[in-house]
Each structure stands twice: as C-alpha cells, then as structure tokens.
Amino acid sequence: MENVFIGITLLGLFILLLGLFLQLKRAVNQDISIFFKLRKNRIFAGLSLLVFTLILQLVGAIGLSITYDHEVNKSGEALRTLTKTTDVALSSWVKGWESRITAVSSNPLLQNRTLELITESEAYDSLIESDNLIWSREAYERYSSSFGSLGFFITSLEGINLSSTRDENIAKKILSREKCLKYLPVQLREKRSLRHQYVLKSYWQIRMVLSKHKRQPCSSSVRFEMLKAKCWQC
C-alpha cells in the first residue's frame, strides 16, 4: 500500500513537472529577453526545481524500499533454512538417543537385575553392598564406553534411589521422579502394577530439549515412551 501511494504521488509530480515545463517553454518562446523579469516565470522555474528534487527523492525512496524488501526476504529465507537444518539435526540427535536408551532398557539381564534390586531393603548399608547395585554400575560403565556418558538411577515407586553412579544419593528420595513420571502415558501412570521405574538421565535430557524448543511429541515419541514404560518394571 505504501509503495502504491508513493507511485501515485510520483506520477502526480511528473504531470506537474510536465505542466511547468510546458508553461516555461511557452514563456521562452514569447520573449526570452524578459523571461526572468516576470515574477510568474521565476515562480514556475523554482517550482520546477522543487518538483524535480522531490521526484529524485521519491525514486530513491522506492529504490531503498525495494532493496530493503529484498534483503528481508533473503534474511527470512536464510532463517527458514537454518530452522529446517536445526530441526533435522535435533530430530536426528533425539532419535540417536532414543535408540541408545532402547538398547539399554530392553536388555533382559538388566531388567532381571533391576527386579532383584527392587526387592531388596531400601536401607543405605544394604543397598551400598548389593551385588545388583555393583552390577548396574558396571553395566553403566560398559554402556558408557559404547554410547557415551548416559548417567542413570533406579528408583522405587516412592522415589527412593536404589542405584546410581554416586554413593551420596543412595537410599534418598529423587526429586525429579515426578517430573519423569509425568511424561508417561496416562493409562500407564494410573496403572497400579507400575511399581518401579528404571530412569535414564539421558531420556530426561531429551525431554528437556524437546520442551526447550517447544516441540510437541509426535506419535513415534509416544510409542517410544510406551516402550520405555514396558521396559520399566510393572
């Protein structure tokens, strides 16, 4: 709309300049010797210069506007390309971690060890000497050598930490338990037989990244969560 208004104004100025030029030409043809002696001719000459200057400014403004729009479009296209590239990279990163977590949590030996661990006493001295806790840490080290540092903890339904990489938080309540559980499907959260959870920090990190980028979990993510829920002990 702004460019249309400028175009109409420019056309009007061109018509005005043409009219002034014809008026001055007529005055010159009548008697050039007294051209500038007449006040009317001086006014027409001044108006002609003013209109010509305005036309040049409007042409420059139109050129700057076109250049600005072009640069904005280029910047927008660059941002769209960057967004798509980032989205693809993030999706690839998430899927990579999903496959790693699936490989870890679907290990039958790990599941059996977890079942044994959750039947033991939740006392610190008992847990710290548990063969299952020691085995889970050794398993974590083996997985870390292949997948990178995962980080893990195994909690009871009450949120008591049964196994993790550090001794300091063994037999203590894990505050992030409720945050992790809220990402499970509703039907599994309400299921009474869901007694214990095997939670990997890397899975929580994936959820944090998805939340940070305002991405809604797709159907594959939901299936992934259900798979994790099945791998956690019911």
Image (spheres, helix red, strand yellow):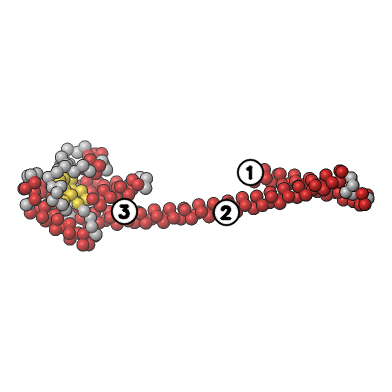
In the picture, the quarter occupied by the C terminus is top left
10 Å crowding of disc 2: few (<14), some (14-19), many (20+): few
Q: x and y percent of residue 141 in the render? A: 17, 59
Q: Amino acid at mark 2?
A: His
Q: x and y percent of residue 195 in the render? A: 15, 42
Q: Which residue is mark 1?
A: 2
Q: Which residue is mark 3?
A: 94
Q: Secondary structure at mark 1?
A: helix
CA gap between label 2 and label 3 equals 36 Å
- The number of callouts visible is 3
Q: Which residue is mark 2?
A: 70
Which residue: 63% across, 43% down?
Answer: 2
In the picture, the quarter occupied by the N terminus is top right
Residue at the far bottom in the pictured view: 145
Q: x and y percent of residue 145 in the render? A: 21, 62
Comes first in the chain, label 3 or label 1: 1
Comes first in the chain, label 2 or label 1: 1
Q: Amino acid at mark 1?
A: Glu
Q: Which mark is on residue 141?
A: none
Q: Is residue 188 visible?
A: no
Query: CB of mark 2 within 8 Å of CB of mark 1?
Result: no
